[in-house]
Image (tube, rainbow, N blue to C red):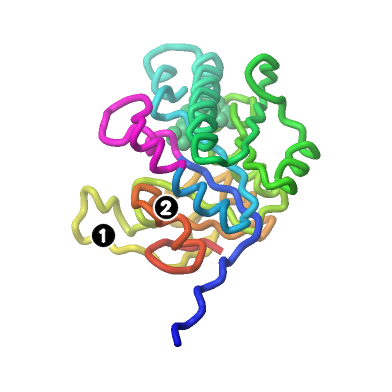
């Protein structure tokens, strides 16, 4: 007799996808095949009854710090970065709908003609109805990246874990793309990440997760089927708790 399939570890989670993931092998923008693959993975998880919040970055289109570094006023550059996250949110919404997943985009910067404004109780209701809620425009405030809004929304929405989908399969002692001797951590504490300045996420996001005791799971969203696998506790990932 075959053993029963492993149960999913969480009922409600937030997935943060960095914008970079969406560009696939191209250097900029959104690669349609990658977008479709990510949407399929998300749809697979939703079909298992997981209540899912999404926060998507904007680094594939625009990062505030890059232009601020070249002389542009930081706040304006950051607002452009936030708008980039709205574009990604709409792209992901479209791709998820193609997979038959019901979604709502809520933006921290009200944009009535494009999506809903962020209203916590309304977002909660969407989740209860099985809709994926995509939080766009970060916090609506400059001087942050999308890590902190991902942490804040996961606390606000009562998520049991924050999943960070990147192009690397966890947290390493050094950059595995540059250092062949880099070793992946299985488990880290919030303190380890902050004290060793491991740059998994912004320190403000890590501190928020620590104070609210929400674990962070770092995994690669580039491999097909990996999101569900990691939710079952299988495959390769790093947990910060
Ligand atoms: N951003 C911001 N406030 C926020 C969220 C994002 O100012 O609350 C801006 C910031 O300029 C950031 C850009 O939006 O660089 C894109 O987000 P991020 O760098 O997090 O994208 P990712 O690296 O995840 O693709």
Residue 131: x and y, percent? 66, 42
Front residue of 221 and 3: 3
Residue 137 is marked as none
Callout 1 touching callout 2 (CB < 8 Å): no
Residue 7 in sight? yes
Graded by Cα atoms within 10 Å as few (under 14), some (14 to 19) or many (20 or more), the crowding at tag 2 reads some
Residue 23: x and y, percent? 34, 32
The structure residue drawn at horizontal position 66% and vertical position 14%, both measured from the top left corner, is: 113
State the extent of the magenta-drawn residues as a range.
Answer: 18-39
18 relative to 223, above or below: above
Residue annotated with mark 2: 198
The structure residue drawn at horizontal position 70% and vertical position 25%, both measured from the top left corner, is: 116
Side of 102 where 233 appears, left or right:
left
Side of 123 where 82 appears, left or right:
left
Side of 235 where 140 appears, left or right:
right
Which residue of the protein is positioned furthest toward the top in this rendering? 72
Q: Is residue 109 magenta?
A: no
Front residue of 23 and 207: 23
Which residue of the protein is positioned furthest toward the bottom in this rendering? 1
Spatial CA span between label 1 and label 2: 13 Å
Residue annotated with mark 1: 182
Residue 143 in sight? no
Q: Secondary structure at mark 2?
A: loop
Q: Is residue 36 magenta?
A: yes
On the rendered image, what quadrant is the C terminus found in? bottom right
Q: Secondary structure at mark 1?
A: loop
44 relative to 29, above or below: below
């Amino acid at each position: 007799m075959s053993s029963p399939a492993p149960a999913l570890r969480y009922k409600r989670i937030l997935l943060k996808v960095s914008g970079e993931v969406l560009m696939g092998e191209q250097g900029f923008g959104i690669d349609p095949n990658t977008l479709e693959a990510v949407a399929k993975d998300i749809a697979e998880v939703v079909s298992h009854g997981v209540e899912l919040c999404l926060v998507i970055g904007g680094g594939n289109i625009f990062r505030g710090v890059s232009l601020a570094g070249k002389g542009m006023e930081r706040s304006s550059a950051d607002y452009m970065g936030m708008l980039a996250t709205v574009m990604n949110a709409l792209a992901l919404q479209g791709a998820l709908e193609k997979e038959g997943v019901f979604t709502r985009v809520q933006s921290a910067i009200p944009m009535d003609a494009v999506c809903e404004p962020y209203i916590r109780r309304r977002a909660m209701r969407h989740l209860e109805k099985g809709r994926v809620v995509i939080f766009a425009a970060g916090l609506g405030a400059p001087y942050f990246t999308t890590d902190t809004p991902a942490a804040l929304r996961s606390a606000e929405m009562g998520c049991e874990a924050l999943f960070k989908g990147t192009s690397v399969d966890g947290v390493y002692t050094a950059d595995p793309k540059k250092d062949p001797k880099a070793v992946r951590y299985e488990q880290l504490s919030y303190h380890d990440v902050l004290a060793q300045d491991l740059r998994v996420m912004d320190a403000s996001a890590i501190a928020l997760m620590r104070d609210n005791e929400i674990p962070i799971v770092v995994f690669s969203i580039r491999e097909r089927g990996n999101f569900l696998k990691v939710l079952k506790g299988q495959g390769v990932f790093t947990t910060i708790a």
